[in-house]
Image (tube, rainbow, N blue to C red):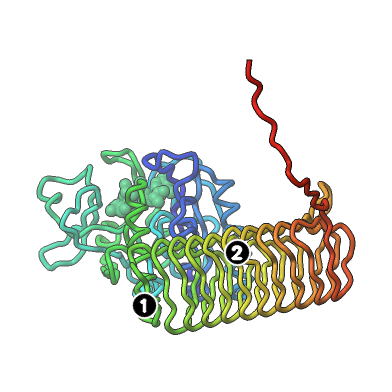
Amino acid sequence: MSAIDIIILAAGKGTRMRSELPKVLHRLAGKPLITHVLDAASALADARITVVAGHGMDLVQGEIENFQGELQQRTKNSCPIKCIEQQEQLGTGHAVQQAIPGLDNSAGTALVLYGDVPLLDTRTLERMLASAAQGKLTLLTVVLRDPSGYGRILRDSADQVIGIVEQKDASVDQLAIAEINTGIMAMPVTRLKEWLPQLSNDNAQGEYYLTDIVALAAQQKIAIETLHPESLEEVEGVNNRSQLARLERYYQARQAETLMEAGVALADPARFDCRGRITAGRDVFIDINCVFAGKVTLGDGVSIGPNCSIANATIGDGAIIKANTVIEGPVTIEAGVQVGPFARLREGTVLRKHAKVGNFVETKKTEFGEGSKASHLSYLGDTRLGKDVNVGAGTITCNYDGVNKHRTDIGDNVFVGSNSSLVAPVTIGEGATIGAGSTITRDVPPNSLSVARGKQKTIEGWQRPEKKRT
Ligand code: UD1
Ligand code: CA
């Protein structure tokens, strides 16, 4: 297959977003709009991508670099992506023209995409490319009940496409046409190069319209084919925050559907958000209002309570994550573990089989051995716990001396009494017991008892002071 040149138009300011951020960097499902387009485009064989940027070009370029890095990591493939500047937004035709000098001269196919149309399916793009590879000008069109605002597809009496007229240039009759231009089109590069210099800006908006190439093709009797997407949402653009929110819900509903088809039970698919990727086993249950991000793997029978936020975690078979738990991975949770309610597991937390982390417990860079528990109100950072350790309520690892972080090492079968402070670096030997309320500053030998707190004093028959009478 010959090379594919994909031109992504992304110079527009996006005035209606009312934002400092360039429109194409607004996020859908946690990912910038342009990255969705880059994902679909880079999945095409032999693709080379040129992004035409304008407003916030530096930021757009930065995002493209992120994308390339991640693509390389994820697929070991790279896709050449250039970012070029359109200094003034003089129209879609002018924008494409900016990309031309950088394109390969050989007989490839060009595909024009918009950076603010995020949900195009790679399969739709493949159909367009197959059509354009036959020398045709291929347009992606849809029929809308309300076509207002869009360019209308003009056809002759034999139903052949003869041009596109923009809303602002259209006659009353033309405005009644329901078939509209999505803006997505493909054609041989050689044709595109020949047509672009012929565009003029003699129209209602004073812009160089890319859409005017359609009439040029028709005059030359070049075959023009129209194709349609599988769904309308595929070609929906984002111009304001309300459209973005609508597309987000559509996207989330589709993801929820896919998960349910794979055997996941969702308490309410309308209250489910995945801003990353979930892989799930069978009979997983996810309650309402959970937000997933990054890469999340859920084993068979995992149950997730309401209002959890889970990012970059691997959760083993039968684990139970109770309400309002926050997981900020990378975090590994093995089979049969219980977490929450109201737990916060931070990066580097590893919970081995049947471990338990209860309410108001925060963990960071901490490994729990099999069956170890911290059931209430603790902070455990830079810590290793062996097997079957019991950490009493209110236990804190003092891992930070204001400059450096230090480690706490707790052996198998240790019992840490409630409200203890473990001042790191410190090692608690296997089988040791720590009395409640201790501040442990020195290593504790195995199978010993350490109590480090003020001794209790008792005064019998103590009289409380009384208020003086005046
Ligand atoms: C364009 C089409 C219209 C189609 C509609 C679909 C033209 C002349 N009109 O109209 O037929 O129905 O899209 O949404 O092509 N852009 C640039 N540089 C520019 C101008 C635009 O990069 O100088 C980018 C924008 O950022 C945007 C895309 O091109 O991503 C479309 O531009 P927009 O102004 O939204 O075009 P419409 O007027 O909506
Ligand atoms: Ca638009």
Q: Nearer the viewer, residue 188 or 334?
A: 334
Sequence order check, earlier mark of 2 and 1:
2
Q: Nearer the viewer, residue 293 or 203?
A: 293
Asked where in the image residue 231 lies, by quadrant, the reply is bottom left
- The numbered disc on residue 107 is none
Task: Where is residue 220? Give x, y as percent.
Answer: 28, 63
Relative horizontal placement of residue 109, taking residue 442 as reference (left or right): left
Asked where in the image residue 130 lies, by quadrant, the reply is bottom left
The amino acid marked with disc number 1 is: Met
Which secondary structure, mark 1? helix
Tell me what residue is drawn at x 14 percent, y 67 percent: 159
Quarter holding the C terminus? top right
Q: Which residue is mark 2?
A: 68
Task: Where is residue 423? Give x, y as percent.
Answer: 82, 56
Q: Name the residue furthest top.
A: 470
Q: Which residue is mark 1?
A: 260
Which secondary structure, mark 2? helix
Q: Nearer the viewer, residue 49 or 397?
A: 397
